[in-house]
Image: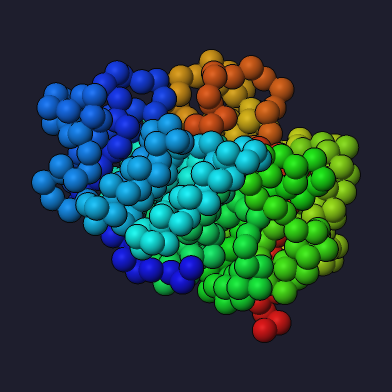
């Protein structure tokens, strides 16, 4: 269907009705309680004929939608699948047309009953002009509106939208990505996509002023030609990052039983990505890394990087990892080599690219002095710094041992190494960004300390990864995106 702007009220509703609201406090599916917990400022109407006249979470309960005393901006349906058609008829009678069907048990079941039930749903929707999200989905999460029926949310809004055919992936992505500094404008779990599909929401997000980047998890799509046109147009100004589920034979069978989606041939999707320039990723971890990269890095002139790390073997392996991700480690100029060699002892170090300066990392003055000529080198456009956690936690003195048992507050005050890197990233006149790989190190640390170091650096605008493979893969795709658009 063509995007109906009247559905937009569902992203900022003043009234929400929950049909099938439970009188019991549930571990999962307590949608009235979740809205209250999210701080939803509008009015919530629990609908449950068995509890009519009573209260659910302190709110008056109604027997049906028609009994609600005001118009409903969004209806959430959580009743057994066989009861959904009658609830949809009530929606028509109450003139409540924006609907999220949480209930599963439709075409994704693969049996005649489920397929027939979804056809019935579609017939009612067309007859009544209903705008349906789902069925079999987690619906909407809109931080700015404090709209969420999900258990785990972050209240801070941001520029990232996420469209997901899988409710589970959406539920995982939001809290995990939040730890990487990602904040959301809209998250839409749309399930079987009987009425509203990914294409419809892309049309909306293309013009949404609150959205600057779009992530997607897709299992199947009805109109591949329109999807290609939309993504190609949107991707020029708002990066589109896509995780395509069901790319293998086994995955395609799983997708059919998950949301009833029929995935296309891999060759078709390969052509799609080549035509649109959308960023293809493979899995939740990569989705988080790439999204964070787009938020933290500005466009880079090229794929030429300097890799600095500790350990000769690590440097060799790291060069291979970077190359596989499409990153180039060019030779330093003679001027750079001469300057590095003027103050770094040759014993236990390698000053070519990749750089092994593990021995001198315990002297912060030499660390800073090493970064400056590398950033000045005209062959280099960004610096990947792979550092063990024990080095990151060093203090200001030379050869100081890392605070193995330091409380978490010590991390917040920042170590000498972190201060040095943060200052250099903000002040270096060459504009060469630092990209940090935070490796486990060889010491034992307070639980959660690596995450605390990550948070300090992220707040300062420095992208942080937990392996070189993850960093190089994300940065490589970031560069490829900008290279694609530089040609058009």
Foreground of the two, 259 or 436: 259
Q: Quadrant of residue 476?
A: bottom right
Residue 375 image position (x, y, % from top left): 67, 61
Residue 46 in view here: no
Residue at image location 67% in from the left, 79% down from the top: 486
Foreground of the two, 352 or 221: 221
Residue 216 image position (x, y, % from top left): 58, 55
- Looking at the picture, the colour scheme in use is rainbow
Q: Quadrant of residue 204?
A: bottom left
Image side of residue 327 versus residue 170, left or right? right
Q: Quadrant of residue 4?
A: bottom left
Residue 361, compared with residue 289, is above or below; it is above
Residue at image location 28% in from the left, 60% down from the top: 9
Residue 425 image position (x, y, % from top left): 55, 55
Q: How many marks?
A: 0
Residue at image location 19% in from the left, 46% down from the top: 66
Foreground of the two, 106 or 190: 106
Image side of residue 488 versus residue 78, left or right? right
Residue 390 image position (x, y, % from top left): 64, 28
Residue at image location 42% in from the left, 62% down from the top: 126
Quarter placement of the C terminus: bottom right
Residue 367, compared with residue 295, is above or below; it is above
Residue 223, compared with residue 36, is above or below; it is below
Residue 147 in view here: yes
Question: Which residue is outermost to the bottom?
Answer: 488
């Amino acid at each position: 269907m063509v995007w109906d702007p009247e559905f937009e009220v569902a992203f900022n509703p003043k009234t929400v009705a929950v049909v099938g609201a439970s009188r019991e406090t549930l571990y999962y599916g307590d949608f009235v309680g979740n809205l209250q917990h999210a701080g939803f400022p509008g009015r919530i109407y629990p609908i449950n004929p068995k509890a009519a006249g009573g209260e659910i979470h302190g709110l008056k309960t109604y027997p049906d939608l028609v009994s609600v005393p005001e118009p409903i901006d969004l209806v959430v349906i959580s009743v057994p699948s066989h009861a959904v058609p009658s609830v949809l008829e009530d929606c028509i009678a109450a003139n409540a047309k924006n609907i999220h069907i949480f209930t599963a048990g439709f075409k994704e079941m693969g049996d005649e009953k489920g397929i027939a039930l979804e056809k019935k749903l579609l017939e009612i929707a067309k007859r009544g002009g209903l705008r349906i999200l789902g069925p079999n989905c987690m619906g909407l999460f809109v931080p700015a509106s404090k709209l969420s029926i999900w258990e785990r949310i972050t209240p801070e809004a941001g520029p990232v939208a996420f469209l997901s055919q899988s409710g589970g992936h959406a539920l995982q992505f939001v809290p995990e990505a939040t730890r990487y500094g990602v904040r959301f404008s809209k998250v839409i779990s749309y399930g079987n996509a009987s009425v509203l599909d990914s294409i419809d929401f892309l049309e909306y997000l293309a013009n949404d002023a609150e959205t600057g980047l779009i992530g997607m998890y897709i299992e199947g799509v009805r109109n591949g030609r329109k999807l290609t046109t939309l993504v190609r147009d949107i991707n020029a100004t708002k990066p589109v990052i896509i995780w395509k589920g069901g790319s293998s034979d086994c995955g395609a069978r799983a997708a059919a039983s998950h949301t009833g989606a029929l995935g296309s041939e891999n060759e078709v999707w390969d052509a799609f990505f080549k035509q649109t320039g959308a960023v293809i990723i493979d899995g939740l971890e990569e989705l988080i890394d790439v999204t964070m990269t787009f938020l933290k890095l500005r466009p880079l002139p090229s794929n030429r990087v300097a890799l600095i790390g500790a350990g000769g073997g690590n440097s060799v392996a790291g060069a291979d990892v970077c190359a596989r991700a499409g990153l180039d480690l060019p030779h330093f100029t003679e001027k750079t080599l001469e300057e590095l060699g003027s103050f770094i002892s040759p014993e236990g170090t390698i000053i070519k690219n990749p750089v092994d300066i593990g021995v001198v990392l315990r002297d912060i003055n030499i660390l800073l002095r090493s970064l400056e000529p590398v950033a000045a080198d005209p062959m280099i456009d960004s610096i990947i710094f792979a550092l063990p956690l024990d080095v990151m936690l060093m203090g200001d003195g030379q050869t100081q041992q890392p605070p193995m048992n330091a409380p978490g507050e010590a991390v917040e005050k920042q170590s000498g190494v972190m201060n040095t890197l943060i200052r250099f990233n903000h002040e270096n006149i060459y504009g060469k960004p630092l990209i940090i790989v935070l490796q486990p190190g060889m010491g034992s640390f307070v639980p959660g300390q690596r995450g605390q170091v990550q948070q300090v650096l992220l707040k300062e605008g420095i992208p942080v990864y937990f392996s070189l493979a993850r960093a190089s893969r994300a940065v490589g795709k970031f560069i490829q995106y900008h290279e694609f658009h530089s040609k058009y």
